[in-house]
Image (cartoon, grey):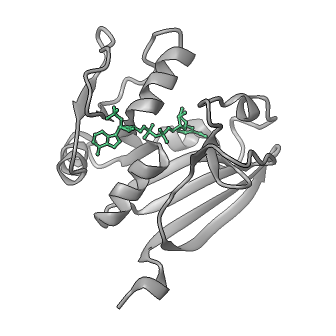
């Protein structure tokens, strides 16, 4: 089970054009409330992200790697590796990455941290099961898109946490109008 769990602006951006998340980090929320991070993370066995997100996490954490779980970073480059971090760099087809993550996760769910195009790559491969979003009461007009693909999803659950509306969707597949 691969879950794209993320926060987004109301107009569907993960970050502003300069990769800032200042608009997100100032929002009030309850860590233990609906759609909270700790409860989600407790069920995760492996994580995957693109290189921009990786570099943002490292910069935000003062060069430290916050996850003890096996992690995959998609990149065509050779970014700096953090000492002692359980990270593999991978590129190209996401299907072998999904298989390796599943093998490493010990039956727990896989977390797709971001970004949006990477989520789209997994969706195109039929490997994105769920999208869980916390929608911040902010619009940016431009930035890094949440999920730049044409997909149909089914709303499974919704709730409120502080300033956020949380929603869990099951990915049903390509947009109905695009299916032949
Ligand atoms: N709102 C939130 O909660 C949240 C969550 C996650 C991320 N974010 C932020 O949102 C932004 C996302 O950035 P982004 O949209 O640029 O996406 P990203 O997925 O973090 O990074 C994109 C980069 O990853 C590499 N990549 C992706 N797929 C690849 C593949 N199949 N093979 C090889 N390389 C691949 C490419 O870079 P290279 O090949 O050049 O390395 C690509 O330019 C970041 O600022 C991040 O911090 C916010």
User: Measured from the top left, where is residue 90 in percent x and y?
Assistant: 22, 36
150 over 73 or under it: above or below: below
Residue 54 in which image quadrant: top left
Residue 52 in which image quadrant: top left
| Along the line of sight, the residue nearer the viewer: 95 or 33 | 95
At horizontal 72% and vertical 29% (from top left) the residue drawn is 25
At horizontal 60% and vertical 72% (from top left) the residue drawn is 155
At horizontal 56% and vertical 17% (from top left) the residue drawn is 60
| Along the line of sight, the residue nearer the viewer: 42 or 21 | 21
Is residue 177 rendered to the left or right of residue 125?
Answer: right
Quadrant of the image for the N terminus?
bottom left
User: Measured from the top left, where is residue 157 in percent x and y?
Assistant: 64, 66
Q: Can the viewer see residue 1 in this picture?
A: no
User: Measured from the top left, where is residue 24 in percent x and y?
Assistant: 72, 35
Quadrant assignment for ligand 1: top left
Q: Can the viewer see residue 98 in this picture?
A: yes
67 over 141 or under it: above or below: above
């Amino acid at each position: 089970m691969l879950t794209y769990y993320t926060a987004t602006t109301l107009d569907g951006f993960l970050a502003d054009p300069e990769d800032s998340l200042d608009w997100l980090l100032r929002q009030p929320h309850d860590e233990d409330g609906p759609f909270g991070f700790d409860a989600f993370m407790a069920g995760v066995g492996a994580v995957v992200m693109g290189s921009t997100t990786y570099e943002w996490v490292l910069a935000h954490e003062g060069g430290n790697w916050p996850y003890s779980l096996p992690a995959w970073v998609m990149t065509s480059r050779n970014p700096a590796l953090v000492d002692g971090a359980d990270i593999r760099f991978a590129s190209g087809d996401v299907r072998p990455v999904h298989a390796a993550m599943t093998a490493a996760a010990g039956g727990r769910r896989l977390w797709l941290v971001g970004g949006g195009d990477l989520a789209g790559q997994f969706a195109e491969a039929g490997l994105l099961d769920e999208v869980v979003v916390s929608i911040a009461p902010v619009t940016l007009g431009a930035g890094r898109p949440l999920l730049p693909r044409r997909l149909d999803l089914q709303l499974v659950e919704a709730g409120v946490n502080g300033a956020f509306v949380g929603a869990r969707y099951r990915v049903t597949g390509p947009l109905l109008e695009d299916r032949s």
